[in-house]
Structure formats: structure tokens, C-alpha cells
Image (cartoon, rainbow, N blue to C red):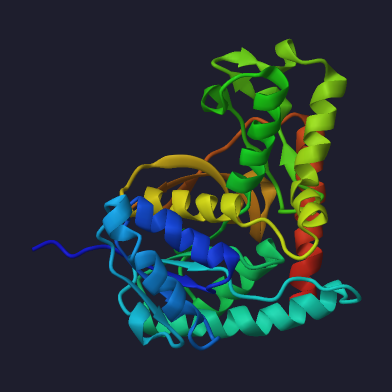
Amino acid sequence: MARRSKVSIVGAGNVGATAAHWAAAKELGDIVLVDIVEGVPQGKSLDLSQAGPIEDFDSRIVGSNGYAETEGSDVVIVTAGVPRKPGMSRDDLLAINKKIVGDVAQNIAKYAPNAFVIVVSNPLDAMCHVMHHFTKFPRERVVGMAGILDTARYKTFIGRELDVSVEDISAMVLGGHGDTMVPLPRHTSIQGVPLTELLPKDKIDAIVKRTANGGAEIVGLLKTGSAYYAPAAACVQMAEAVIRDKKRVVPAAALCQGEYGYSGLFIGVPVVLGAGGMERILKLDLNAEEKAMLDNSANAVKGLVEALKLE
């Protein structure tokens, strides 16, 4: 009898719990929700399990305060970490989340040594380095989720501006997750029609700017939290691509080994996700301006990685 796939999600906050919801709805397999707060992963997993008879899914969903339940996971989504609080420096956030993600990484290596790991914890690109360093997994099995979310925001704003279905928009956002992300209007089209033929430059520039500030806009509106529906959906799209060997072409933070002129650096690039994990990085033809923007993004990530002091 074929074994069900197993998806473990570390961190049962808004992003983690919502990822469990999307994964269950897609019946990606059995789901383990891990969190250090006693009762929270157990309660949320029980609640979500009870939606199964209503929404017709049979995923076995369990909550745990430890990692033993994650044993043999096919995919692990890591959302653990603290958000940046007022008065907290970038280095403070880095140090705290380095310790949290480092501990998570060592437990993944112990209990799920063959898993594909999707990092969501911030600062995203830097935490990919922490995960890779402490798991010692090959680059094919550690990626960061950012580009899919940034691209989804970009597509949302384009779809609203043009009053067209987001399903007909082909687009990609590269680079680090944050102000230095690199939307690519030149490579954006609506059913083959270039975006540059449908919108004037000022409108495109406004969309690009809003995309770069997409997370901050939501934080500003919520006031007491940050985005979680779309980030969680993006994680689950990546998990589904691996579990179902879909060979999806998506932007993700991947460890470059010479691609785009970068080595030993996690940066948002187009990748193919399938049963082999991050199966390959695709080369996009970037013009001088686009490459300069990507270099700027890469330099920002390099600064964070140097501050991590990973030996």
C-alpha cells in the first residue's frame, strides 16, 4: 500500500496554521503542526481536522510541541521566528531568528533527513543560509519562499489595473524579499501581450513600487500583525510542486553556484520544482538595468549573511 506524503509545518501562528489549512484542502498528505506553545498546535490541528468531513479531505492532522511526529516528512515548511518589533535593530532580529531557525534546522536534520525544506522565516534570504548551514542538506532541498508571494502581489495589482483575470498574467519577481526585490515588467505579459504595450510606464512604475511595499502595506492596515493568507498559499504551492512532481517554474530563494554571476548566495531566481526538489535554476536574459537591480538585491543579502557570522 502506498504511503501518504507527510508535510510538517514548524510554527503554528497565522502563516503556519493557514498553510496547514491550504495543504489539507489540497490533500497533500498527512500534516504535522509544530509549535513551542503548549496546546496551540494541538488545538488548531484538531479544529482543522474537524473541517475534513465538511470540506471532504482525509488528511490526518496532528499538533505537537516536539519534533518526533515530523519523522519521515517529505516537506517541512518553516515559519518559526519572531517578527521585527519597534526599536529592534536588524542585527537583533538576525541574532534571535538565527538561534530559532538553527535549532529548527538541527531537528529537521535529525527527524526528517530526506525532507525538502521551505523557509519562510525572516529575514528570508538570510534564514535560508542558516537552514542550509545547520541541516547540511544539498542545495536542491533548501529553498526560501518569497518570489511566489511577491509575484502574486504584482499580478494582483496588474489584474486590478487592467481589469483582467490574474490567471492570464505571466510574470515573475526576482531578488531578495524586501525593498530590493526585482519585478520584471519587460518579461510580464497578459496571454502573450507584453504589459509594456498595455500600460504606460508611470502606471507600471506605480505597480512595481506597490509590489515592493506589499508586505508593509498590509502591516500598516492590520496594525497588529502581517500578511498570512497569501504567504501560506505560496508555501503550499511549492510543497505541492515537490510532492506531486509538477515541475513548476517559480521564483524562489535558491543557492546559486555560479548562476547569474553569484556563488554561495541564496537569492530569488527562477527555479523548477519537482520530485527532486529544486531541480534546476533557469537563466533569464536580463538587460543591464535588470541585472544592476538584481546585483543590488544580492548585495543586500550578502550584508545580512556576513552579519550572521556562520562558521
State whether residue 175 appears in this view: yes
Determine the residue positioned at 35% across, 50% down.
26
Residue 110 occupies which quadrant of the picture?
Answer: bottom left
Counting every numbered tag in the picture gives 0
**Extreme-left residue of the structure:** 1
Query: Quadrant location of the N terminus?
Result: bottom left
Residue 32 is left or right of residue 251, and the answer is left
Q: Nearer the viewer, residue 271 or 51?
A: 51
Query: Quadrant location of the C terminus?
Result: bottom right
State whether residue 27 appears in this view: no
Determine the residue positioned at 74% across, 70% down.
305
Residue 60 is left or right of residue 75, and the answer is left
Q: Nearer the viewer, residue 301 or 39?
A: 39
The percent position of residue 86, horizontal first and vertical second, equals 88, 73
Q: Nearer the viewer, residue 71 or 268?
A: 71
The percent position of residue 79, horizontal first and vertical second, equals 57, 69
Residue 53 is left or right of residue 250, and the answer is left
Residue 171 occupies which quadrant of the picture?
Answer: top right
**Extreme-right residue of the structure:** 87
The percent position of residue 204, horizontal first and vertical second, equals 79, 25
Determine the residue positioned at 39% across, 65% down.
48
Q: Is residue 279 above or below residue 249?
A: below
Residue 183 occupies which quadrant of the picture?
Answer: top right
Q: Is residue 292 above or below residue 266?
A: above
The percent position of residue 299, horizontal first and vertical second, equals 80, 56
